[in-house]
Amino acid sequence: MSEFNDLMLDGVICQCCGQFLGDEAGYPRSCAACEKLDSREYTELNESESHAPESAIAPEELDDDLPF
């Protein structure tokens, strides 16, 4: 991997925008601005009426005779 990827995976830079975050955390992290954006998008997604596409099959329409 590249050095940039290693820095992102170690948590030295934000995994979304690349902003410097400081010392290694050992896992990918996001800066405060990106966390705020992510939480707002997550909230908006949960407040929407339906997440499933119109072509999705409802669970009650599935066959129970599946081989697995």
Image (cartoon, rainbow, N blue to C red):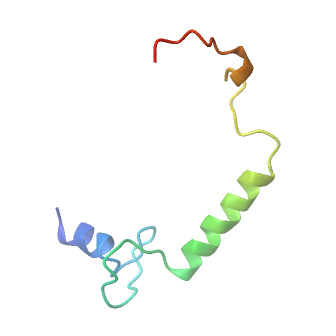
Asked whether, in this view, residue 15 is left or right of residue 62, the answer is left
Locate residue 22, reporting x and y percent.
36, 90
Residue at image location 32% in from the left, 90% down from the top: 23
> Which one is in front, 4 or 28?
28
Locate residue 65, reporting x and y percent.
57, 9
Residue at image location 62% in from the left, 13% down from the top: 64
Asked whether, in this view, residue 57 is left or right of residue 10, the answer is right
Asked whether, in this view, residue 17 is left or right of residue 2, the answer is right
Furthest-bottom residue in this view: 22
Looking at the rendering, which quadrant does residue 59 occupy?
A: top right
Residue at image location 29% in from the left, 76% down from the top: 10
Residue 21 seen anywhere in this rendered image of the structure: yes
Residue 58 seen anywhere in this rendered image of the structure: no
Q: Is residue 60 above or below residue 18?
A: above
Q: Is residue 1 above or below residue 35?
A: above
Number of marks in picture: 0
Residue at image location 16% in from the left, 62% down from the top: 1
Locate residue 35, reporting x and y percent.
57, 73
Locate residue 21, reporting x and y percent.
40, 86
Q: Is residue 16 above or below residue 59?
A: below
